[in-house]
Amino acid sequence: MFVSDFRKEFYEVVQSQRVLLFVASDVDALCACKILQALFQCDHVQYTLVPVSGWQELETAFLEHKEQFRYFILINCGANVDLLDILQPDEDTIFFVCDTHRPVNVINVYNNTQIKLLIKQDDDLEVPAYEDIFRDEEEDEEHSGNDSDGSEPSEKRTRLEEEIVEQTMRRRQQREWEARRRDILFDYEQYEYHGTSSAMVMFELAWMLSKDLNDMLWWAIVGLTDQWVQDKITQMKYVTDVGVLQRHVSRHNHRNEDEENTLSVDCTRISFEYDLRLALYQHWSLHDSLCNTSYTAARFKLWSVHGQKRLQEFLADMGLPLKQVKQKFQAMDISLKENLREMIEESANKFGMKDMRMQTFSIHFGFKHKFLASDVVFATMSLMESPEKDGSGTDHFIQALDSLSRSNLDKLYHGLELAKKQLRATQQTIASCLCTNLVISQGPFLYCSLMEGTPDVMLFCRPASLSLLSKHLLKSFVCSTKNRRCKLLPLVMAAPLSVEHGTVTVVGIPPETDSSDRKNFFGRAFEKAAESTSSRMLHNHFDLSVIELKAEDRSKFLDALVSLLS
C-alpha cells in the first residue's frame, strides 16, 4: 500500500527498531541511502546496509538476515515485482519500498499489511482499480441453497433448469471478467519507465522532519541528475524536478549574496547553473570533452573524417586557439573562460545544436574544488561499475558511497579519471560499431552485438554501462543514418558477460525521438520470446529490460523477438 504520511507511517515506526537496508547498485539509490544514513545518524537508529545488484543477491541476503530483522527498507528495488512471492517472508515482516521503477506491481499496491510503498502519489501511476483485478472468493463460491424435499417433481425440474442457466451465466461472467482483467493488467504492465528520484523522496522526508542539510540537498540533486544522465526520465520531468530543488537551494544558500552574512570561503556552497552540456569539461580539456560527450559527438558525427573537420570549423568559429582548447580547462586563459559558455552556445546554434546548455547545479568546497552534478554522477557510476579486479562488487559499492562525502574528495577525483576512460571507450566503441556497420535492422528493431575480444569490451558487461553505451549508440546511429524508418526503431544490444559460462548481457532501448516518453516495452517482450523458445535466460537485474542469456540461445531468442514485435 502507498504510505501517505512518511513521517508517521515510516520514519517514526523504524526509529525505535533495528532495520536492514537493501540498496540497489545505481547512483540515485546511493544518494537516497546517504540521506537516510544521515537521518539515522541524527536519531541513533541502528541499521545494517546490504548492497544488492540483482534479484539473486536480494533473495540470498534476505534469507541470510530474515531471522534477525523485522523491518526491511528497499531502495530502488522491489516495487515492480510481487515481492512477497519472491522472498516468501514471515507474516510479521514489513517491507518499506522506495523505488523509481514503474509500473508498481498491483499486489504490492493492494497489500495493506506487509508492503509499504514510499512512492509519491503525484507521479502518473495509473494503478488499476481493486475490483477490476481482484475478486473475493466468496463471490465465486456462492451456490444456491439446498432443494427442499417436499416440493413437486415438476417444480424441482424447473428449479434445476433455472440453476443450470444461472451457473452458465455466472461462468460466462467469470470468463469475461478474467479476459478483461488480463487486458487491464497487460495494458498496465506493458511498458517499463521511471518515477521521481528516490533521493528526492528521501530529501523531502528530511525536509518534513526539519533535518535537511546542504549535504542532503546535494545528494538529492545528484540522484535527479543521475536519472537525466541515464535518460530515465523525460526532459519535462527533469525541468519540473529541478524547479523543486532550486527552491530548496535558494533557501539553504541565500547567505552568499548578503554582504553581512556571507559564508566563510571553505564552506559548502550549492548554486543553480545554466551550464554547458559537456561531460566533465571542467576536469578535462575542452577538446576531449567535445569529442567524448555523446550529444556533441553524435551531432558532429565525429567517427567520420567530415565530422572531425566540422569540429575544427566549430572551434574556429568560436575563435579559440587549439593550444588553449587542448590543455586542461583549469589552465586556460581566464579572459577566454569568462564568457566561454556564451561563445560555445552561440557557435553551437549555428551548427544546429540548440540544446547546448542545460539547467543544473554545481557545488563548491572552498575555493579549490568545484563540481557539476553530472561530474559526480559519472565519477560515482564509474567507481561502482569499475572493471578493476582488485575488489568485489561490495567493495566498489562502498567506494562509490564514500566518494559522495566531501571528506573523500580523493575518491571522487579517482572516479573522475575512471569516468574519462569509460567515456573515451564508449565513443571509440560507437565509432567502430558505426564504421563497420555492426548496427543492423532486424525489421521491428535495430540490433548490435559486441564481439568477444573487442577493445574495452569488459567495460560494458555491467548493465548501467551497457545501457548508457546503447543509448549513446542509438543517438549517434539516428544522426548518421539516412533511412527514415530506421530513425524510429528501438535498439537491442548484446555484450559478452562471462566467457566461461558462455553468457551475454542483452539490453533493450526504446526509440530515440524528441517526443519519447522513455517508456520501455522490452521487459515483457524478452520474457515472452524466451518462454516461447525455451531460451535459458536470467532476469536478474532490477530493470526488466536487461537480461542475461546463454550465447548459444541468442539466434533463436532474436528470431522469436522479431516475430513477436512484427
Image: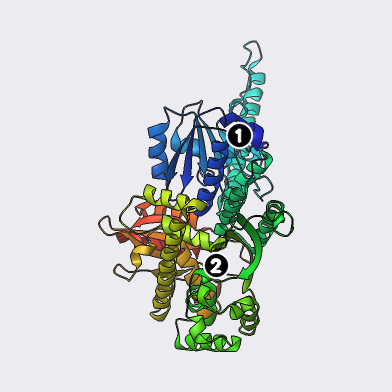
Residue placed furthest toward the left: 500
Q: Which of the two labelled residues, at mark 2 and mark 1, occupies the earlier sequence position?
A: 1
Q: Nearer the viewer, mark 2 or mark 1?
A: 1
Name which residue lies at 46% across and 53% down: 408
- Give the residue displayed 48% in from the left and 68% down from the top: 445
Q: Can you tell which quarter of the image residue 504 is in?
A: bottom left
Q: Is residue 489 left or right of residue 410?
A: right
Q: Tell me where residue 263 appears, x and y as whole percent.
A: 66, 55
Q: Is residue 164 left or right of residue 402?
A: right
Residue 246 has which mark? none
Amino acid at dot 2: Pro
Q: How far apart in space, not on screen, are marks 2 and 1 (Cα)?
A: 40 Å
Residue at the spot of label 1: 11
Residue 535: % across, % down:
35, 54
Residue 305 screen position, x and y as percent: 45, 88
Q: Nearer the viewer, residue 173 or 313?
A: 313
Amino acid on which disc 1 is placed: Tyr
* Residue occupied by mark 2: 511
Image quadrant in which you'd find residue 191: bottom right
SS at circle 1: helix
Query: Is the N terminus in the top left, top right, bottom left or bottom right quadrant?
Result: top right
